[in-house]
Amino acid sequence: MAVHVPEALAASLVDSLGESGRVWAAGLPTLADGLLERWSLRPDGPTAHGVVGLVLPVRCEDGTPAVLKLQPVDEETAGEPLALRTWGGRSAARLLDHDPTTGSMLLERLDPARSLLAEPDHLAAAGEIASLLADLTSHQAPVGMRTLAEIADAMLAEVPEALGGLADPGDRRLLADCAAAVREVRPDPGDRLLHWDLHYGNVLAPVGPDGRAPWLAIDPKPLAGDPGFELLPALHNRWADLTATGDLPRALHRRFDLMTERLALDRPRAVRWTLGRVLQNILWDVEDGEEVIDPAQRAVAEALLGR
Ligand SMILES: Nc1ncnc2c1ncn2[C@@H]1O[C@H](COP(=O)(O)OP(=O)(O)O)[C@@H](O)[C@H]1O
Ligand SMILES: [Mg+2]
């Protein structure tokens, strides 16, 4: 049975990966068919996708609902199966099977219609994320995981060139301040298993009440490092909920304090690693040709720097 590759996914694969994205998209139906047969799965509902991944709802031979996640393996996605296996279904979707050759994963099916994006109280949603992170980062990262230390070093090496790409002196100062914050914490980069991308859309409810947990994480881009590097997604996603409070710095501080308290983090270190995440975002934007710091990133950094 031919699996349909959504046009938007094919376009986004080409956008992100160029020719190799086109080749990957063209090979997807064959890859999916092979895995359906090998793992005795049958398609069971409409496909979902993200920027580069295809998520196909399936039923296992015994009727268990699952999803097949197919994505090109790169340094960000390579650790996903190992992280999910380490978590063993606690606070994260369970990994049911994995093909190391193609990086394909068979995952426990969660309810894609119920994510933390729909939790009415955004502060409660941030609290749920903090609770999940406390559990996920209680594990030491398995050997072989990409490290925050290497990411911090790579970022710091890019700073001099990026400074030249920003037009405004205030923006250059902010970039330099974020880099200085990273330099301060770099000597102790941490060894916890980090999810790295725990925003509200990457937290789904289980299908039906299974008595396990109200919320489970999906889609890790895992790292070994300090949990302070985990906070930015939940801090700045659902931005409209922050601005609607009428006091953006206070709203950011409330989320930040809630998360650092629930994770029992040292606040000054968490501030510095969060500025490191802001640095990462600024560097990506500059690399894409942006000459101005994104106002949301600026607002987060200024709130944390107390400006
Ligand atoms: N285990 C799962 N159960 C149900 N739906 C899922 C599951 N994993 C992913 N999805 C759906 O597929 C979408 C994209 O998957 P995700 O793992 O978040 O990849 P990415 O965002 O990197 O493309 C999710 O937002 C969700 O709608
Ligand atoms: Mg996702």
Image (spheres, rainbow, N blue to C red):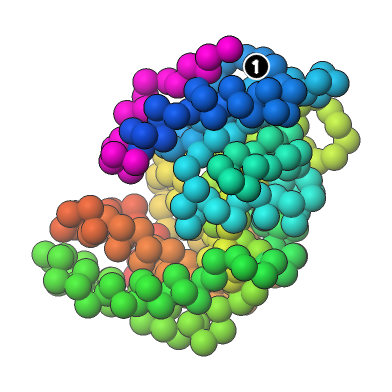
Which residue is found at the position 67% from the left and 70% from the top? 143
Magenta stretch holds residue 307: no
Predominant secondary structure, magenta span: helix
The residue that appears at 24% across and 58% down in the rendered structure is 287
Pick whichever, 66 or 135, lies toward us: 66
Q: Which residues are magenta?
A: 1-20
Q: Residue at x 75, y 48 (%)?
A: 91
Can the viewer see residue 233 in this picture? no
Is residue 295 toward the left or the right of residue 41 in the image? left
Q: Residue at x 59, y 56 (%)?
A: 79
Pick out the residue farthest to the right: 211
- Judged from the image, the secondary structure of the residue bearing numbered disc 1 is strand
- Residues 10 and 8: in front is 10
Residue indicated by mark 1: 43
Task: Pick the quarter of the image with the C terminus.
Answer: bottom left
Residue 207 position (above or below residue 73)? above
Q: Is residue 286 visible?
A: yes
Q: Is residue 136 above or below residue 61?
A: below
**Is residue 228 shown left or right of residue 166?**
right
In the foreground, 168 or 124: 168
Q: Is residue 216 left or right of residue 29?
A: right
- Picture coordinates of residue 248 (x, y %)? 41, 52
Reply above or below: 262 against 12.
below
| 2 drawn magenta | yes
Point out residue 231 in the picture as x, y percentages from the top left corner. 54, 60
Q: Residues within 10 Å of mark 1 (few under 14, many from 20)?
A: some
Residue 52 rendering spot, x and y as whole percentages:
44, 37
